[in-house]
Each structure stands twice: as C-alpha cells, then as structure tokens.
Amino acid sequence: MLNRTKYFRKLCLSGSFLVGLISLSSSANAQFIGINADVAISYSAAPGKADGFSVGISHPAPFIPNIGYSSVSFKDKETIGSDNDTSSVLLDTATTIKTINLFYNVPFPVVTITVGFGLGGVETKTTIVENVSDKSTSDSKDSVTEGFFHIGLPFWNTVEFHLGYHLMSFTSIDITSNKTGDPFQGTYNTKKNYKGGMTTIGVQVAF
C-alpha cells in the first residue's frame, strides 16, 4: 500500500511538471503583437520599375481581423499617334495605388498563411505634349479593391520571412479625361489598364 502511495505521488508530480512545461511553452509561443514590413519587387502592370511596400499589425485576439496598408507607384511614358496619323501625343504618367486592408493569419504546419482584402484608390497624374509644343496636364482618380496572400516561414517564434502577392483590381482609366487647356488636335486612344499584381518580400517581428 505504501509503494502504491509513493508511486501515485511520483505520477502526480511528473504530471504537474509536464503541464507546467506545456504552459511555459504555450506562453513563450503566444504572440502578443506582430509588425509586418514588406517591399515590392515587381508590379505586373508597370512598364518598368515599381516602388511599393506593405505594412501590417497583427494581434492574438481571435476572429478580429488585423489591419494593414499597401502602396505601389510607377511611371509610364508613351508616344501615341492619332487615328489619321496627322498628329501625335506624348503621355508621361505617374500612377499611385494605395489601399487599407484587413487580414487573417491562418496557422499551418511548418509555414504560415496570411489572407486579406482591402479597399483604396488609384491616382494618375499625366503630362500631355501634343505635336511637341502643346503642353497640358490631366489628373484622374478611381477606386481599387485588393486581395492578397502571404506565405511565411517562421524562425524562433519571433521572426518570420514571407513572400506575398497583392492583386489590385479596378476598371480601365482614361488618363487624359481631365485634360487642361485646348482640346486634342487628333483622336487618340488614351485608356490604360493598370490593374495587376504586386509581388513582395518581407519580414514579421513578433513581440
């Protein structure tokens, strides 16, 4: 009977020790808050280099979405001939897309998955030069919807490196619709489809 009592005490102590270790491990792995910072490496609709970034703040509260912000900008320069080839126009356009987004972190074995959506706007500022001498400008704005995902690889429960893709969706824009000055001398197709995907790489640091 005494041996059974000693064995039961040892079993209780061992169980308590194991539960304590699990609790400590859970506390160590629990993320209080995380900061995401990403930089764009490309934007599919940009004719050349694009500058962009994405930032976000994660929290441990279940069901409540995290919040973030995305931005991408690029330039487009093009000469377009008129329908009757009697004149031409040079368009120098700077485009900026900005969104505020909500996202969730989905736990997976080994990797982490983040999915989200956002709303924002796209703005174009165009310098217009027709037939070398006639210079004017045009600014336009439109709304944007964003859908994105990140795939991350965590290290030490505090740092995560990830790859992301942000799809920016909106209708085609006529970048000369708000042209200042005199009307065009020729007829040009100045509609642009700048919707596309921003590929990013980044890091999350958890506190």
Image (cartoon, rainbow, N blue to C red):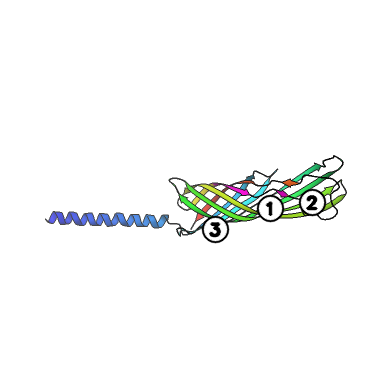
Q: In the image, which residues are magenta?
A: 163-173
* Magenta span: chief secondary structure: strand
Q: Secondary structure at mark 3?
A: strand
**What's the residue type where badge 1 is placed?**
Thr
How far apart are the alpha carbons under marks 1 and 2? Answer: 15 Å
**What's the residue type where badge 2 is placed?**
Thr
Query: Which label number is shown at residue 42?
Result: none
Count neighbours of disc 3 (C-alpha within 10 A) and say few if under 14, some if 14 to 19, many if 20 or more.
some
The tag earlier along the polypeptide, 3 or 1, is: 3
For label 1, the residue is 96
x and y percentages locating residue 151 in the rendered image: 51, 46
What residue lies at 20% left-to-right and 57% top-to-bottom? 9
Query: Which label number is shown at residue 67?
Result: 3
11 or 118: nearer the viewer: 118
The tag earlier along the polypeptide, 2 or 3, is: 3
Q: Is residue 174 left or right of residue 103?
A: right
The tag earlier along the polypeptide, 1 or 2, is: 1
Q: Is residue 22 left or right of residue 124?
A: left
Count neighbours of disc 1 (C-alpha within 10 A) and say few if under 14, some if 14 to 19, many if 20 or more.
some
